Amino acid sequence: KAGVTQTPRYLIKTRGQQVTLSCSPISGHRSVSWYQQTPGQGLQFLFEYFSETQRNKGNFPGRFSGRQFSNSRSEMNVSTLELGDSALYLCASSLLRAGEETQYFGPGTRLLVL
Amino acid sequence: AQSVTQLGSHVSVSEGALVLLRCNYSSSVPPYLFWYVQYPNQGLQLLLKYTSAATLVKGINGFEAEFKKSETSFHLTKPSAHMSDAAEYFCAVRHRAQKLVFGQGTRLTINP
């Protein structure tokens, strides 16, 4: 079974631009979560989607948004990019059923904002 | 609120020595607990997980962890370190239907 895939793997943007990152979950997984990883803040939760609905949300500004499609694929968007948005963005998928909470991660998208 | 504390941001051991990475969690109810490993420029790979079955959990690459409710700990061990174990390790906790919360990570260095 194929793992979680994320595209693109690397991205360079300039301040003020917007960016869209894509995540395809493991087949059969209906939950997708997004995380931001930086050296200073570590791994921080952005949001989680299940069946096209946002279930949980982290403490990020409204510039960060996401959505999930009917095939469980997810996108996250960051508008008006700031230098501090440079990070590794990780997507994880999960079955999210009783007794099975394990999240499986993709390779990440490394975003550099200049 | 749930939280995770990993003691030691950097651990260094000799090849062949015991690896012990410490993780303590804060939770009002029994949680799901996980250890993930991250190699440079890669995503997180699941090492093992505790989901209220056996308290001693065996994972991949010879790692294991023991859930101790009385100590609210879930330390990761490996009897004999290998050079390929050099990576960053993350402990994480999750309650049903809630977000996954990570510790700050422990960077493991293996000395030849």
Image (cartoon, coloured by chain):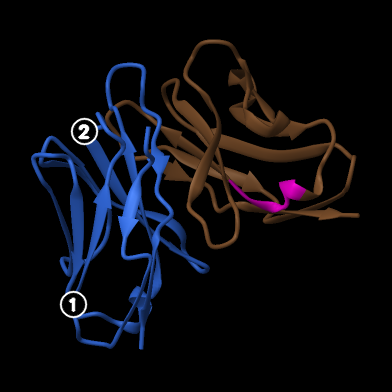
Chain colours: A blue, B brown
| Residue at horizontal 38 percent and vertical 40 percent from the top | A3
Badge 1 and badge 2 in a common chain: yes
Q: Position of residue A7 (x, y in %)?
A: 30, 61
Residue corresponding to mark 2 = A30
Does A45 sit left or right of B28 as displayed?
A: left
Which mark is on residue A18?
1
Instruction: Give SS at disc 1.
Output: loop
Q: Seen in the image, is A49 located left or right of residue B53?
A: left
On residue A61, which mark appears? none
What residue is drawn where x is 58% and y is 19%? B69
Q: Alpha-carbon distance for marks 1 and 2? A: 27 Å
Q: Which quadrant of the figure has residue B61?
A: top right
The crowd level at tag 1 (other Cα within 10 Å; few <14, some 14-19, many 20+) is some
Q: Quadrant of the image for the N terminus of chain A?
A: top left
> Numbered disc 2: what chain?
A
Tell me which corner region of the image, top left, top right, bottom left or bottom right, holds residue B107: bottom right
Find the magenta span and give its range. Answer: B84-89
Which amino acid is tagged 1?
A: Gln
Label 2 neighbourhood size at 10 Å, few (<14), some (14-19), many (20+)?
many
